[in-house]
Image (cartoon, rainbow, N blue to C red):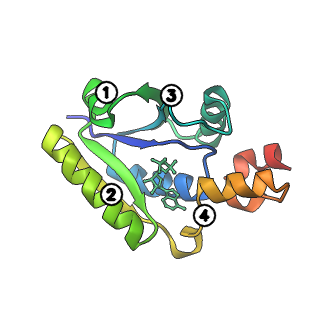
Amino acid sequence: MKKIAVFPGSFDPITKGHSDIVLRSLPLFDEIIIAIGVNSQKQSLFSLEQRIAWIKQVFKEQPKVRVESYEGLTVNFCAKMQAGYLLRGIRSSADFEYEKTIAHLNHDMLPEVETVLILARPELSSISSTIVREIIRGKGKVEKFVPAEIANDFK
Ligand code: ADP
């Protein structure tokens, strides 16, 4: 059976931390679906269309990677995509505790989906979309924190 992983998140915007997790996970899966969770309660800085366009640009040379958006529970989206794996990145012990709780809940809801946690590389573990948005709001430079393929858009 095809090994399909869903990598869910807000990607507001995609960072070098996200792209590194996807690239390092490529040998593990036949397909990785980067899934932008749309939550009407949560206001994003960048539009869904813009976030999708950046992700497409970053992974345009990677036929195994595609991008989708979804509403509602991540496990329901995994079932719809027939994905057997849910991919998440871990930057810190706080991330781990959070991901552990979510993974256990997801397992209770849909045991067919296995959560795979990949550790952030130390040099990328301080990068978060939240920090990138803060720097953008403060008119600072973020080219170093976003993938090279889209860095020009942030100059
Ligand atoms: P969410 O809003 O669900 O936290 P994000 O877009 O912030 O979505 O993150 C999506 C996934 O990427 C999460 O598993 C998060 O832990 C992981 N991630 C974010 N930044 C990094 C990073 N610098 N290194 C590794 N993983 C990361």
Q: Which residue is mark 4?
A: 127
Q: Which mark is residue 81?
A: 1
Q: Is mark 1 within 8 Å of ligand 1?
A: no
Res 40 label: 3
Is residue 112 in view?
no
Label 1 to label 3: alpha-carbon separation: 22 Å
Please determine whether, in this image, residue 108 is positioned above or below residue 145.
above
Quadrant including the N terminus: top left
How far is the residue under mark 4 from the one under mark 3? 25 Å
Can you tell which of label 3 and label 2 is closer to the viewer? Answer: 3
Q: CA distance from mark 1 to mark 4?
A: 29 Å
Q: Nearer the viewer, mark 4 or mark 3?
A: 3
SS under mark 1: helix
Disc 4 residue type? Answer: Ile
N-term-proximal mark, 1 vs 3: 3
Instruction: Tell me if residue 105 comes above or below residue 127 in the rendering.
Output: above
